[in-house]
Amino acid sequence: MKAVRFHDYGDADVLRYEDVPDPEPGPGEVVIRIRAAGLNHVDIDMRAGTSRLPLNLPHTLGFEGGGDIAAVGAGVEGFAEGDRVTPLYQIACRHCEPCLAGRQQFCARLQMLGVQRAGTYAEYLLVPADSVVHLPDAMTYEQAASTQTTFATAWHCLITRARVRAGETVLISAAGSGVGSSGIQVAKRAGARVITSAGSDEKLARALELGADVGINYTTEDLTERGREATDGRGVDVVLEHVGGSVFERSLAAVADGGRVVVCGGHAGEVVDLDLIELFRHEWSVIGCARATEAELRHVIELVGRGELHPVISETMPLSEAAAAHRRMEDRRQFGKVLLIP
Ligand SMILES: [Zn+2]
């Protein structure tokens, strides 16, 4: 089969579209014919060698995908060739203490597609059958490739970790990203008022169409000042922050007394200055968010299938053009998800 792999860390040119052996399902496993694969910004960090995630080279990236069952291993029940499916991107052991407590993101033996295992930038994917979900009839392969790392992460951040309540004001960073465009929808669904930031007026116009109430262009406007202005000086109750660096610092300064900042990314600067006096005087909470639970992954797939959440797809490109797709994300030209079609 064809897959996109890299043999060395580096810029987008290290991605090679090449022949690799076809996977064969062992007992309890299935092979999925991938019809759409989703890109994530962390793919770029893994390729560049800056992600702090353990990889064995050569490596196939790709957390998410949608496709059809192509082969079924011995002892697998509930799946047949041709079934439309999506693999859960977190493959948990189901036996350790965090797994038994329903917190699979902390599984002691967690394997993620595109990290510890070969990912979805390929024609075929080998996975355990108990980590595969049937697609709801109304859900497309492209939506399947755009749902888990976006909506489940936003859900875990906003609903589970930050406990956003109706009537609160939520500031969401980077409206054009997968987490940003899904965070807007999850926060609105919870009854919050949404302020969002982006680097262009065009992206902000799209964010307002998705339901955001206020848009801030962080390249031409002061994020802190505008965030406070939009709340009559009071500040926002919650920030969903996944950019890092000065965006984290300026977002924190826009938070109301007693407010919380939930963090699930930091590509633009992973180590930041934090003024502890400001932190305790304002009783701010800074909350980490590591992906999502398996229940949340399954829940958002259902909600997308029911048409209650809408994945935002920026564009689809052929799998053979993975390097160009990475460059597109590096230039921040997309609004929503970039997908690869094998
Ligand atoms: Zn486990």
Image (tube, grey):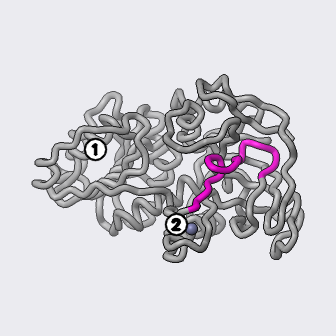
Which quadrant would the N terminus be assigned to in this image?
A: top right
Q: Amino acid at mark 1?
A: Ser
Real-space Cα separation, disc 2 to disc 1, in angstroms: 26 Å
Give the residue at mark 1. 251
Mark count: 2
Q: Where 306 falls versus 205 (above or below)? A: below
Ligand 1 within 8 Å, label 2 CB: no
Assign the C terminus to one quadrant of the image.
top right
Q: Earlier in the sequence, mark 2 or mark 1?
A: 1
Does the stretch in magenta take in 158? no
Q: Is residue 246 left or right of residue 229?
A: right
For residue 155, side relative to residue 285 (left or right): right
Q: Can you identify the residue that label 2 sits on?
A: 293
Range shown magenta: 109-125
The verdict on residue 117 being magenta is: yes
- Horizontal arrangement in the rendering, residue 308 relative to residue 340 (left or right): left
Residue that appears at 61% across and 42% down: 55
Marks 2 and 1: CB-CB under 8 Å?
Answer: no
Residue 129 is drawn in which quadrant?
Answer: bottom right
At mark 1, the secondary structure is: helix
Q: Tell me the amino acid under the disc marked 2.
A: Thr
Neighbour tally class for label 2: few under 14, some 14-19, many 20 plus, Cα within 10 Å? many
Residue at left offset 37%, top offset 35%: 269
Which secondary structure class fits the magenta region best? loop
Q: What kind of element bears circle 2?
A: loop
Judge by depth and name the residue closer to the eye, 59 or 34.
Answer: 59
Identify the residue at horizontal 41%, vertical 59% (top origin). Answer: 157
Q: Residue visible at 42% across and 33% down?
A: 201
Look at the picture and state if 75 lies above or below 308. Answer: below
* Residue 187 locus on image (x, y percent): 41, 60
Would you place residue 14 above or below residue 264 in this image?
above
* Coordinates of residue 161 in the picture (x, y in percent): 38, 64
